[in-house]
Image (cartoon, helix red, strand yellow):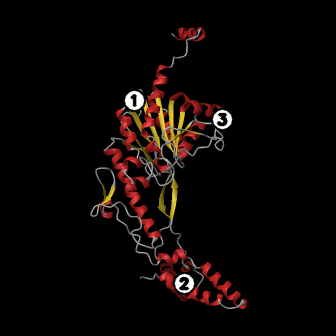
Amino acid sequence: MSISLSSLILLPIWISMAQIQQGGPDEKEKTTALKDLLSRIDLDELMKKDEPPLDFPDTLEGFEYAFNEKGQLRHIKTGEPFVFNYREDLHRWNQKRYEALGEIITKYVYELLEKDCNLKKISIPVDATESEPKSFIFMSEDALTNPQKLMVLIHGSGVVRAGQWARRLIINEDLDSGTQIPFIKRAMDEGYGVIVLNPNENYIEVEKPKIPVQSSSDSSDEPAEKRERKDKVSKETKKRRDFYEKYRNPQREKEMMQLYIRENGSPEEHAVYVWDHFVAQSAAEKVFFVAHSYGGLAFVELMIQREADVKSKVTAVALTDSVHNVWHQEAGKTIREWMRENCCNWVSSSEPLDTSVESMLPDCPRVSAGTDRHELTSWKSFPSIFKFFTEASEAKSSSPKPALTRRSHRIKHEEL
């Protein structure tokens, strides 16, 4: 049985504490002192000393995984599903490995959106300079020109990016349940244009610039010999400090800083930006939204900021386990009334699919997604969402247009 370095360091302290606790009340002070010492030890830092390097492959092949014909991630040699605990008792290292694989998955899904779904990658802001931080969305060729229908997809918060519902599902279940690809393909088959938002791509990360330390030799008042001696001491001190830091934290990651993307610094900002520059400019008579989790909150915020425009252009909204709150977001009465008529929220529930679920909030109807797993609600409600959109589209097409009044007829005649 292997014993970690951190265990060897802490073992004498634990033994001492056990011995002291067997003594009388006079030993309480020693126990307190040892507890204080333990509280000062950074266990995370000690654990890092036992870790292998945080150096992971940058391709699926490097991880020895691939997606099979069913869209399931499997080990190339064993055919087994992904194993999180690749190394026992190294949770942080396993987590970093999982995150590295997740980044590869994100790029893989981007490739599928372009190659498998024939979507175009559009850079934003649309007027960005070459040097400023940028994000992107995906659109079908006819997204802005389709005169009939447009579908807009918004995922939730966290590590997911454009085209994903849940990274966990992609890795542990399959591509159909974890990505938006089934929605995109069916929408295009049914004559929709498609826009895929990327609300979590709010900034780029760059390494923090190191602040240069001014050399003591710049002081011209000191004799040359004294300056040389001080420089030598300074270099030795820095050498010792760097050595200590390397020992104390061998897996120290680079210090990064975030540069936010203009007008897209949050999911809410992103939704409004894409609406203004793309959805509002589209030719579609009927626009439909599918928004999961935090994406639902972003949609409600869009409604608050662009109420009249959204009401005039959007036909129906399918929410999946949305975390919006009309009270906290201060959505007005007219918005709540519109949501009751035009939205439906498929929520996590053990009830059968489409069973009505009681709501505490006065907004849109809530029905069961047919699963009690939050991340699965979009996939499980997939057929019901398209049925909901079809019915909403037919209802709008069959509804009579406003009658022409005498006044409006006179205005039309004068215009002619």
Q: Taking 151 as reference, is 119 left or right?
A: left
Query: Which residue in the structure is indicated by mark 3?
Result: 332
Tell me if residue 282 can be seen. Answer: no
User: Which numbered disc, 2 or 3, marks the residue that appears first in the sequence?
Assistant: 2
Q: Which amino acid does label 1 sit on?
A: Asn
Q: How crowded is mark 1: few (under 14 residues within 10 Å), some or many (20 or more)?
A: some
Of the pair 385 and 351, the residue shown nearer to us? 351
Residue 10: give its label: 2
> Of helix, strand and loop, which one carries label 3?
loop
Q: Which of marks 3 and 1 is nearer the N terminus?
A: 1
Residue at left 49%, top 50%?
373
Q: Which quadrant of the view contains residue 59? A: bottom left
Residue that badge 1 annotates = 146
Look at the picture and state if 118 lies above or below 71: above
Observer-nearest residue: 195 or 282? 195
> Which one is nearer the viewer's eye here, 408 or 50?
50
How far is mark 2 from mark 3, CA to CA?
59 Å
Q: Is residue 311 above or below residue 41?
A: above
C-alpha separation, residue under disc 3 versus residue under disc 1: 32 Å
x%, y% of residue 112?
34, 47
Under circle 1, the secondary element is loop
Residue 57 is situated, as x and y percent measured from the top left of the image, at 34, 65
Compared to 274, does 411 lie above or below?
above
**How far from the left and from the top, in percent, is residue 46?**
51, 78
Q: What residue type is labelled 3?
A: Gly
> As rendered, which of 86 and 251 lies closer to the eye?
86
